[in-house]
Image (spheres, coloured by chain):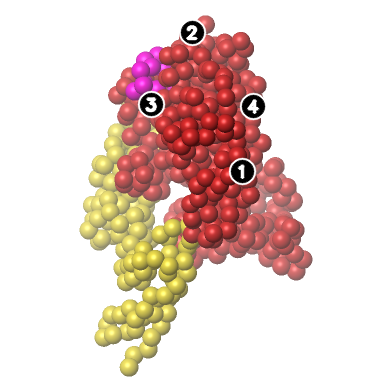
Amino acid sequence: MIYHDLVIIGGGPAGLAAAVSAKDNGIDDILVIERDKEPGGILNQCIHNGFGLHTFGEELTGPEYAARFIDQVLSRGITCKKNTMAVDFSVEENRKVVTAMNREDGVFQISAGAVILAMGCRERPRGALNIPGFRPAGIYSAGTAQRLVNIEGLMPGREVVILGSGDIGLIMARRMTLEGAKVKVVAELMPYSGGLKRNIVQCLDDFNIPLKLSHTVIDIEGKKRVEAVTIAQVDENGRPVPGTEERYTCDTLLLSCGLIPENELSRSAGIHINSITSGPVVSDALETSADGVFACGNVLHVHDLVDYVSQEAAAAGKNAARFLRKNKTRHQEQIELVAENGVRYTVPSFLRPAEMDDTVTVRFRVDGVYRNHTITVCYDGRPAARRKRPVMAPGEMEQVILRREELALCPDLKRIAIRIEKA
Amino acid sequence: MSETYKKELTCIGCPLGCPVTVTLQDASGHCEIISVTGNTCPKGDAYARKEVTNPTRIVTTTVRVTDGAAPMVNVKTASDIPKEKISDCIAALRGVTVAAPVKIGDTILNNVAETGVAIIAAGNVTALPQEMR
């Protein structure tokens, strides 16, 4: 069995940034495993601009952003095994083994000193949405359509209805329009869009594409190919309201209905998964329930900005390097991090104050749209910090930064709660 | 006295997404902004003024690549172009192909749709080895 100090599963934005950071923190023996023929992950099909404003101070397209990190990985001599799929991961008695396969090597096993999980996420498929109707050709997840158009150069259809107004759905509404398709409507189940305002204006308003909030698809017609889709308004419980049905003739239905972290490998290794994020439960070091196994990027929780993925992955790379130098995780006092009152989850889930960095970024999402509210941080029930926010929405990740020196002032601290309160 | 009219916009400066109303008046061939209302910060005012007088966009799309490791390459306008030129820009790129290798920053087309702005590559595509073409 071959051995590498650090094995990174996934060569997308998270895996690449983690590899660069681990190398810069003194780890030389790194292997990145990537299932596609090129590294870069989902960035390669995101040809719109707006990536990298935080990291590089300019607006890049996805392939441009990916290329900057690919260059950093190559210039450091880090090995990336492409066209290689990790099919199993096991952790027993601190022995970490990744089973992978590709056309040249067949099936092979790699033993690792530390592992960074960077597998990204997957789109929620039709089967998970309970849409009635037939199962004809012409129903795609928005990301699949994006890959077909932008990478393969193929058009999925000519007359399009889109369900879901997340950013990928909005981006694809514009993309399909520019490529000559007619996008008839974007329907969104929720009373608000999960996408950025900029995308609503520049992808829908610019092209006069209607956005119908509190609407969903209630029927798909067509036996061989999609022929029509019926949408209807939904009430506050998400149930269709009779009499509000509208039928759109179309040949294509795109689904942009959420992303789910891809944790089959994590589960096969027995790593604890957070039921809200569907990603691993991690410490402030982004270390999972298995010692020496770290997670970052969309496999940990779904991000809206790649810049934050790169930051998080750099932290995971640095922490993996520190683990490899010590080769163990010390289990001591923990402070629990709790999401309360309007906060859906926090990443990380707990802190190890004795080992934490000077600052730890806690990322979280809220459960609805809040105007003029505060983010309140409570130490054992006592409000310790408040920050006013004019608006918060589920589509925009929020963060608070915890400082080690402040926590040191509260030696018996057991529980930090993050909550949303009226200003 | 010429007529005044209103334009409704959504500000894209932050998640607040203020609904902004711009009141305009026709004044000898061009329009003059009388007022901007509904915004909660100066960003909204600046955005609304630019958006009604000179709205611009960066346009990104793909063009076909011959003899490359990938069939398509990401391209974009080197800087923002007037919003009403988006469809002309896309039309000008229809049928354009480039031969691999393509490198980020390579000029694909000069002065697209008479905007004075070039289309440049925004992705890298390596050339296929001779025997694989």
The amino acid type of the residue labelled 2 equals Ile
Assess whether mark 4 and mark 2 are in contact (beta carbons under 8 angstroms).
Answer: no
Query: Which region shows up in magenta?
Result: A22-35
The residue that label 2 is drawn on is A2
Q: Is residue A369 left or right of residue B8?
A: right
Residue for point 25% across, 60% down:
B115
Three-letter residue code for mark 1: Gly
Dot in front, 1 or 3: 1
Given the image, what chain letter belongs to the residue carrying mark 3? A
- The chain letter for the residue carrying disc 2 is A
Q: Secondary structure at mark 4?
A: loop
* Residue A292 can be seen in this image: yes
Q: For the residues marked 2 and 4, what is the alpha-carbon distance in whole angstroms?
A: 27 Å
Q: CA distance from mark 1 to mark 4?
A: 27 Å
Left or right: B27, with A222 as reference point: left
In the rendered image, what is the letter of the chain coloured yellow? Answer: B
- Which residue does the numbered mark 1 point to in the structure image? A381
> What distance separates the C-alpha of mark 1 from that of mark 3?
36 Å
Image mark 4: chain: A
Q: Nearer the viewer, mark 2 or mark 3?
A: 3
Task: Kindly indicate whether the residues beneath marks 1 and 4 are on one polypeptide chain.
Answer: yes
